[in-house]
Image (cartoon, rainbow, N blue to C red):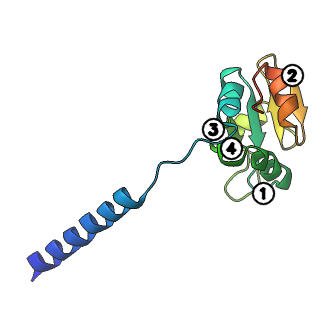
């Protein structure tokens, strides 16, 4: 009886893995993938909080490329505090971009301005 149950769960697990393997598609490149990668390569860091509407808007500007942003989540899981790495950088509001030269821009920053600030290329 126990052997039959184990075999049943193994078959279910293998089937589920097979389903996800054959039905998952690789994520297509986003329009702003190169820009998002370049920002990180140039030392820019985007500090934000999951409950911040302006941070969500900033990410939305990048579309599917947002996953490649050099993003640091500052909010604690209960959203009542700030993570130590953000306090150490003296992050007071969100979103805040900190650049390699330690200069900062706060608020929703246009992609053109981010590209100009970091000498990254903005796609057409």
Dot 4 and dot 3 residues touching (CB under 8 Å): yes
| First reached walking from the N terminus: tag 3 or tag 1 | 1
Q: Provide residue 115's location: percent of width, then percent of height.
A: 81, 26
Is residue 43 visible to us here? yes
The residue under the point 75% across, 36% down is: 46
Q: Residues within 10 Å of mark 3 (few under 14, many from 20)?
A: some
Label 3 or label 2, whichever lies nearer to me, is 3
Q: Which residue is mark 3?
A: 68
Give the mark toward the camera: 1 or 4: 4
Q: Which mark is residue 121?
A: none
For image coordinates 76% across by 39% down, the residue present is 47
Image x and y of residue 54, in percent: 85, 50
Quadrant position of residue 40:
top right
Q: Quadrant of residue 48?
A: top right
User: In front of the other: label 3 or label 1?
Assistant: 3
Image point 70% across, 35% down: which residue?
85
- Disc ID at residue 103: 2
Task: Assign the N terminus to one quadrant of the image.
Answer: bottom left
The residue labelled by disc 4 is 66
CA distance separating discs 1 and 2: 25 Å
Which numbered disc, 3 or 2, marks the residue that appears first in the sequence? Answer: 3
- Viewer-side residue, 35 vs 106: 35
């Amino acid at each position: 009886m126990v052997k039959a149950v184990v075999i049943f769960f193994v078959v279910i697990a293998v089937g589920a893995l097979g389903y996800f393997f054959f039905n998952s598609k690789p994520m297509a490149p986003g329009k702003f993938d190169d820009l998002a990668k370049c920002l990180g390569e140039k030392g820019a860091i985007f500090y934000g909080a999951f409950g911040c509407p302006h941070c969500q808007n900033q990410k939305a500007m990048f579309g599917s490329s947002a996953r490649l942003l050099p993003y640091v989540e500052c909010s604690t899981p209960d959203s009542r505090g700030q993570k130590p790495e953000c306090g150490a950088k003296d992050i007071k509001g969100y979103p805040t971009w900190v650049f390699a030269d330690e200069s900062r821009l706060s608020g929703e920053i246009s992609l053109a301005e981010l590209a100009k600030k970091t000498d990254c290329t903005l796609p057409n």
